[in-house]
């Protein structure tokens, strides 16, 4: 569905997890139209610093954008988390936080249409995200990365470097 299937492993033991997601894209420098995008994420147990899983992936599409990369990253986090677990997704993106905490319920109730009646952007990823959460009985919340969360900022900075590297491999002639 537009993103390479390169998953490495799944977390076997259920629990409470903190996930970090970042994303970037390569808009066309001439007209700023979307280009390839990439996301990076990692999952840690709430009660420890051990990284349970993580990855960075580029979109196979050359017309992807940062929000699509965030939606894809959110799905990948949910996909990697054991059933009956709790996940708190932490991100610098208002889009991912509001989509998970506010818009998802409305989109589902409105037949995957926004308040303007038009189909939502990146619907296929949000439907997959919602179905996976429901099927596996996951509790997912999201929060914006706080300015005083220096550990979270360090994690996101490292993840962003991975996402940018992955994005640059897709289109090496343009900087991420």
Image (cartoon, grey):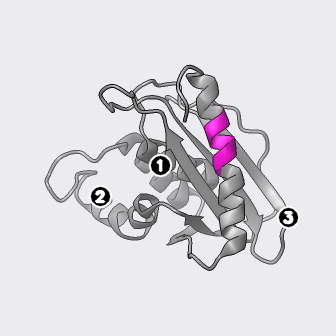
Mark 2 or mark 3, whichever is nearer to me: 3
- The residue nearer to you, when weighing 55 against 170, is 170
- The residue nearer to you, when weighing 36 against 50, is 36
Mark 2 in CB contact with mark 3 (< 8 angstroms)? no
How far apart marks 2 and 1 lie (CA) works out to 14 Å
Q: Could you tell me which residue is drawn at 22 percent across and 58 percent down? A: 110
How far apart marks 1 and 3 lie (CA) works out to 24 Å
Left or right of residue 2: residue 154: right
Q: Magenta part of the protein: which range?
A: 160-165
Q: Quadrant of residue 45?
A: bottom right
Q: Could you tell me which residue is drawn at 39 percent across and 28 percent down? A: 29
Q: Of callouts 2 and 1, which one flags the residue occurring earlier in the amino acid sequence?
A: 1
Q: Quadrant of residue 14?
A: bottom right
Residue 68, percent from left and from top: 44, 42
Q: Which residue is mark 1?
A: 71
Q: Which residue is mark 3?
A: 50
How far apart marks 2 and 3 lie (CA) works out to 35 Å
Q: Could you tell me which residue is drawn at 54 percent across and 47 percent down? A: 23
Residue 18, percent from left and from top: 68, 68
Left or right of residue 85: residue 28: left
Q: Secondary structure at mark 2?
A: helix
Task: Give the crowd class for mark 2: few <14, some 14-19, many >=20 residues within 10 Å.
Answer: many
Q: Secondary structure at mark 1?
A: helix
Above or below, 28 against 9 in this view is: above
Q: Could you tell me which residue is drawn at 22 percent across and 55 percent down? A: 114
- Per the rendering, the mark at residue 107 is 2
Q: Residue furthest top?
A: 173
Residue 71, percent from left and from top: 47, 49
Q: Quadrant of residue 97?
A: bottom left
């Amino acid at each position: 569905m537009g993103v390479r299937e390169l998953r490495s492993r799944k977390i076997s033991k259920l629990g409470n997890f903190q996930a970090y997601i970042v994303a970037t894209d390569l808009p066309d420098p001439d007209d700023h139209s979307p280009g390839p995008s990439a996301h990076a994420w990692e999952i840690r147990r709430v009660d420890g610093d051990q990284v349970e899983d993580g990855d960075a992936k580029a979109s196979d599409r050359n017309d992807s954008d940062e929000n699509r990369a965030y939606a894809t990253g959110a799905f990948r986090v949910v996909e990697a988390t054991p059933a009956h677990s709790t996940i708190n997704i932490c991100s610098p993106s208002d889009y991912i936080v509001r989509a998970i905490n506010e818009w998802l319920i409305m989109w589902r109730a409105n037949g995957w249409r926004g308040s303007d009646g038009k189909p939502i952007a990146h619907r296929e990823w949000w439907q997959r995200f919602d179905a996976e959460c429901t099927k596996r009985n996951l509790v997912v919340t999201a929060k914006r990365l706080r300015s005083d969360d220096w550990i979270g900022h360090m994690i996101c900075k490292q993840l962003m470097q991975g996402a940018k590297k992955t994005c640059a491999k897709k289109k090496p002639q343009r900087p991420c």
